[in-house]
């Protein structure tokens, strides 16, 4: 929902802030007062093309800013998160059912502009992606979604209530896609198989032959240091052995003497007896240390051959570590991965057979669900046509005809392969059939329309005028109950060429649509304006010799005056006011 639109230096607008409410927001005012400027600014904000002509005369820079309250939607959140543009935990409302989105577009006379989403730089491509979640604009020459056949599919499914079937089809499609990706990966490996097998065999043989052991390099480094310092180590061992054990004044000799004296002292003072056990432990430790020093010194022997062997082994380990990740651990991990990958390649044929069996079953399951969805679409399309034709008759298009074409793309491909249709069609017959399926099923849905008697039905984009398209979209939205993801729907000049009873029918439909979506509508018809939940009047004023646009929210008395003006023109009569009161009353 659009909560606030802030416009600066755009067209006739100097500074303008417009707040919008839930439900039906009506913008009225004299012709040329600036109502459509507000709609155009909103269109630019959500990714529309900007022309320097839109800037207010005498200025070289302007901006448009919108505050949206958006219902929680996983796809939208994923889109923004992938772009790194919003933290949902910080922007969610206390109810955690919606979050705020601030979009700002700064424009300049040079054509350069900046786009911000929640105060972070963004791209125009992102704005276009966001548009379908935020705003639909339908006006003269501006039909953002009606002419898109993807929208036709969504509207038909919404009318038919196909959400559960759609979910089943999407799940089945993901399963098919996953299996196909795995087969494609195996094919990619197969293309490189011979070269890859040779490489893997060589690396596995090299690593297995090296018989790597974690910590071996550290142990060899220590041994190398010992061999390089045999004389020093021998001298240290002998000196320490003498000081602890062999010399007349050795530590053990002095310790034995101290122990004897302390034993005698304990006979007179018992508290010294508790130290005797500690002294005995110290003696045992010193004896063990001295014997270890003696044995270590006896085994020390300089060996040039062993030193060379160690250096060769360390050089080999260093080469393998550089080649396979920097350590013995990463080299061993590489060995395990290579062995596993070689096993996969060697068993790829068996694996592909398994995958193809699974893919066949998954595809059959997908086609079963897609066929049910196709039948449901075909069944619902006739009811949808009837409901839409009834609706468009109520909005001054009594002679218009509407048709829904539902085509199964796979059936078309199969027919083309049998030469039953024109083989110059857009479908590439050599493509795998799986390329013609999707998470929405196998159907292509297109709306066709004829506004006048005697004209054949043609695709909407080729025959519907701006006013007709706006009214048709209003009918489609109300018939299809488009409430799956509420957004702001804008109708600019939807009342072109209609009046009286038809205007009231349009107003009723707008009111119904506003129960599930926020609706903004620019109108000149009091029969439509009477239904407003929020009525804003747009006016031009001359301030300091410059024309400016202002928008004012009307209270009940203000609405009566505005409706009376719309009924009679510049001179408002008491009769017009009474009529306006009756319109609001009923």
Image (cartoon, grey):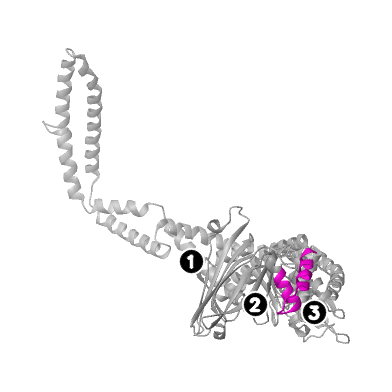
* Secondary structure that dominates the magenta span: helix
Q: Mark 2 points at which residue?
A: 35
In the picture shown, does residue 434 fall above or below 258?
Answer: below
Q: Name the residue under label 1.
A: 202
Q: Can residue 440 be seen in this view?
A: yes
Secondary element under disc 2, as helix, strand or loop, is helix
How far apart in space, not on screen, are marks 1 and 2 (Cα)?
75 Å
Secondary element under disc 1, as helix, strand or loop, is helix
Q: Which of 223 and 101 is in front in this view?
A: 101
Q: Which of 410 and 71 is in front in this view?
A: 71
Task: Give the residue furthest to the front.
Answer: 574
| Residue 424 falls left or right of residue 299 | right
Q: Which mark is residue 498?
A: 3
Which of the 4 image quadrants contains residue 323?
Answer: bottom left
Q: Give coordinates of residue 492: x percent, y percent.
A: 70, 77
| Residue 307 falls left or right of residue 374 | left
């Amino acid at each position: 929902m659009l909560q606030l639109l802030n416009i600066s230096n755009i067209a006739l607008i100097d500074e303008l802030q417009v707040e919008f409410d839930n439900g039906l927001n009506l913008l009225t005012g004299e012709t040329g007062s600036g109502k459509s400027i507000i709609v155009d600014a909103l269109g630019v904000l959500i990714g529309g093309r900007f022309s320097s002509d839109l800037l207010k005369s005498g200025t070289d820079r302007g901006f448009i800013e919108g505050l949206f309250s958006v219902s929680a939607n996983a796809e939208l959140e994923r889109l923004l998160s992938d772009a790194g543009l919003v933290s949902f935990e910080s922007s969610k409302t206390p109810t955690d059912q919606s979050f705020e989105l601030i979009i700002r577009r700064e424009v300049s006379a040079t054509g350069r502009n900046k786009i911000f989403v929640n105060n972070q730089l963004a791209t125009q491509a992102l704005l276009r992606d966001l548009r379908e979640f935020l705003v639909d604009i339908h006006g003269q020459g501006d039909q953002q979604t009606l002419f898109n056949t993807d929208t036709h599919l969504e509207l038909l499914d919404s009318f038919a209530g196909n959400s559960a079937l759609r979910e089943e089809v999407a799940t089945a499609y993901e399963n098919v896609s996953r299996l196909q990706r795995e087969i494609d990966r195996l094919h990619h490996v197969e293309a490189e198989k011979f070269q890859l097998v040779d490489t893997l065999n060589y690396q596995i043989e090299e690593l297995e032959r090296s018989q790597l052991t974690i910590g071996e390099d550290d142990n060899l480094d220590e041994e190398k240091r010992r061999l390089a310092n045999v004389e020093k180590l021998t001298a240290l061992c002998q000196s320490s052995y003498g000081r602890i054990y062999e010399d007349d004044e050795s530590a053990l000799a002095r310790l034995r003497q101290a122990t004897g004296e302390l034993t005698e002292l304990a006979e007179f003072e018992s508290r010294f007896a508790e130290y005797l056990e500690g002294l005995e432990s110290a003696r045992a430790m010193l004896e063990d240390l001295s014997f270890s020093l003696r044995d270590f010194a006896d085994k020390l022997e300089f060996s040039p051959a062993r030193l060379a062997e160690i250096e060769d082994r360390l050089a080999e380990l260093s080469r393998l570590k550089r080649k396979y990740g920097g350590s013995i651990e990463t080299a061993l991990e590489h060995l395990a991965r290579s062995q596993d990958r070689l096993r996969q390649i060697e068993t790829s044929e068996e694996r592909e057979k398994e995958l193809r069996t699974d893919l066949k079953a998954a595809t059959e399951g997908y086609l079963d669900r897609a066929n049910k969805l196709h039948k449901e679409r075909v069944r619902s399309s006739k009811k949808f046509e009837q409901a839409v034709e009834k609706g468009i008759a109520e909005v001054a298009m009594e002679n218009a005809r509407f048709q829904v074409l539902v085509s199964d793309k796979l059936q078309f491909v199969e027919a083309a392969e049998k030469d039953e249709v024109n083989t110059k069609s857009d479908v590439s017959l050599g493509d795998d059939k799986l390329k013609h399926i999707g998470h929405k099923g196998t159907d292509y849905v297109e709306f066709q329309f004829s506004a006048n008697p005697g004209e054949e039905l043609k695709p909407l984009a080729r025959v519907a005028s701006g006013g007709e398209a706006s009214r048709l979209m209003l009918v489609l939205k109300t018939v299809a109950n488009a409430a799956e993801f509420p957004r702001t729907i804008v109708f600019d000049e939807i009342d072109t060429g209609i009046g009286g009873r038809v205007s009231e029918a349009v107003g009723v439909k707008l009111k119904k649509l506003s129960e599930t979506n926020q609706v903004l509508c620019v109108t000149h018809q009091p029969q439509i304006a009477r239904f407003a939940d929020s009525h804003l009047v747009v006016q031009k004023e001359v301030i300091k010799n410059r024309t400016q646009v202002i928008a004012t929210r009307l209270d009940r008395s203000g609405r009566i005056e505005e409706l009376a003006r719309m009924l009679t023109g510049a001179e408002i009569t008491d009769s017009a006011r009474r009529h306006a009161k009756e319109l609001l009353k009923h």
